[in-house]
Image (tube, helix red, strand yellow):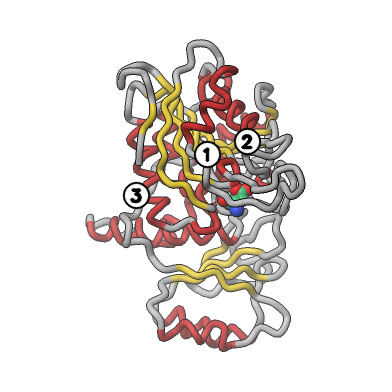
């Protein structure tokens, strides 16, 4: 899609990649029904134009529309395109920072995806990639998009020793690592940061910063971005009272390659699933378990010994664990092709074992 700028390609600038979302949404009756709207209607260049007059002096902006969707319809092809665009921009000397406007429904998936595929590069290039969005459409009174975009631009363009290069997110005056996003509220202005350890934009808290540094010291190597059409098929299955064996058995005649189990409590699943899950694993379907509780970590062999080959997901939520499992399956395939005997579990553990920022 298009790129908008009136500066030359070599002029230092911040790149704004538009993906759509409520930040680009329009309500037909903004005064009476602000929450009845369509996402992904306003172009990213128009969002930038709204705040251009208050952008810090000397900060040049270039916008590029990658998609304009309601992010509940995010596809793996969108992620591939976004990941490749971010990588390209991180390697472009003229790009000093990257802001991504995104729908909040699946910003959680994109956050983990970008950390896992571009986090190391962002760090070594000393550039910040900042995800942002909005909970209110662009034309309602009190719309939060412009201030979120402005905060994201400020964060992407402030001197680097304030906070290292990396992949972050900003909303409602707070920032966190993008991998810590999880939308846990239907309407609150900070919905994707509800459980995230975060820091005030412009006032970075030292304990948060040391957590960021611990994550970055542990994240040694970015994983490959799957090509469009090469993403492994992974489903999320939620365990619940009255769970039936058929829920798992149903998939065994399909080409599914992995399950993320959103289990109860510590990430356990109903005993009715033991037998079909054993069959799934014998068929080579990858299995990772996480918790449906919405907070806390799922730990290896807790409370019972894990089945051989089944991975606990640490603090990854089910949507994040699904992206992690897809990236891990793809990375293992690429490594094996290159003659390296690494398993998907090796790659998955790198993401599940990242230090938690408290
Ligand atoms: N449904 C919207 C989206 O994810 C919600 C939002 O952006 O806040 O695109």
Q: Residue furthest right?
A: 32
Whether residue 309 is situated above or below residue 144 in the rendered picture: below
Front one among 155 and 355:
155
* Ligand 1 under 8 Å from disc 2 Cβ: no
Q: Quadrant of residue 299?
A: bottom right
Task: Give the residue displayed 61% in from the left and 57% down from the top.
Answer: 317
Identify the secondary structure beneath mark 1: strand
Residue wearing tag 2: 145
Task: Give the residue displayed 59% in from the left and 55% down from the top.
Answer: 316
Left or right: where 233 falls relative to 34: left
Identify the secondary structure beneath mark 2: helix
Image coordinates of residue 213 in percent, x first then y, are 56, 32
Residue 330 in view: yes
Of the numbered discs in the image, which one, if any, rests on residue 320? none
For the residues carrying marks 3 and 2, which lies nearer the camera in this image? 2
Of the numbered discs in the image, which one, if any, rests on residue 224? 3
For the residues carrying marks 1 and 3, which lies nearer the camera in this image? 1
Left or right: where 2 falls relative to 39: left
Image coordinates of residue 135 in percent, x first then y, are 67, 44
Whether residue 324 is situated above or below residue 215 in the rendered picture: below
* Ligand 1 under 8 Å from disc 1 Cβ: no
Q: Quadrant of the C terminus?
A: top right
Task: Give the residue displayed 72% in from the left and 46% down from the top.
Answer: 34
Whether residue 271 is situated above or below residue 350 in the rendered picture: below
Left or right: where 209 falls relative to 123: right
Image coordinates of residue 342 in percent, x first then y, are 34, 58
Identify the secondary structure beneath mark 3: loop
Residue wearing tag 1: 101
Task: Give the residue displayed 51% in from the left and 86% down from the top.
Answer: 249
Front one among 57 and 310:
57
């Amino acid at each position: 899609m298009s790129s908008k700028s009136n500066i030359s390609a070599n002029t230092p600038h911040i790149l704004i990649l538009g993906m759509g979302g409520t930040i680009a949404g329009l309500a037909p009756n903004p005064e009476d029904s602000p929450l009845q709207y369509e996402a992904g209607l306003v172009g990213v260049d128009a969002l930038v134009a709204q705040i251009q007059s208050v952008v810090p002096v000397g900060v040049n902006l270039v916008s590029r529309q990658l998609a304009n969707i309601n992010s509940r319809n995010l596809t793996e092809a969108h992620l591939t395109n976004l990941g490749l665009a971010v990588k390209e921009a991180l390697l472009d000397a003229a790009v000093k920072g990257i802001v991504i406007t995104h729908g909040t429904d699946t910003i959680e998936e994109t956050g983990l995806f970008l950390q896992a595929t571009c986090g190391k590069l962002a760090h070594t290039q000393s550039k910040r990639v900042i995800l942002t969005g909005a909970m209110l459409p662009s034309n309602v009174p009190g719309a939060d998009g412009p201030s979120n975009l402005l905060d994201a631009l400020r964060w992407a363009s402030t001197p680097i020793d304030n906070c290292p290069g990396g992949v972050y997110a900003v909303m409602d005056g707070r920032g966190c690592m993008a991998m810590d996003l999880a939308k846990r509220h239907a309407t609150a202005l900070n919905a994707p940061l509800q459980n995230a350890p975060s820091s005030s934009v412009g006032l970075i808290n030292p304990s948060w910063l040391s957590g960021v540094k611990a994550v970055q010291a542990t994240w040694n190597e970015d994983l490959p971005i799957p090509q469009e059409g090469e993403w492994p098929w992974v489903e999320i299955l939620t365990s619940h009272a009255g769970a039936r064996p058929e829920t798992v058995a149903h998939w065994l005649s399909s080409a599914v390659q992995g399950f993320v189990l959103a289990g109860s409590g510590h990430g356990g699943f109903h005993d009715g699933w033991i037998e079909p899950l054993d069959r799934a694993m014998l068929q080579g379907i990858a299995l990772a378990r996480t918790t449906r509780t919405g907070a806390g970590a799922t730990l290896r062999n807790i409370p019972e010994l894990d089945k051989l080959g089944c991975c606990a997901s640490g603090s990854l939520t089910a949507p994040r664990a699904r992206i992690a499992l897809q990236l891990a399956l793809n990375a293992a395939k690429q490594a094996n092709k290159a003659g390296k005997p690494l398993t998907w579990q090796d790659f998955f553990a790198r993401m599940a074992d990242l230090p938690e920022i408290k």
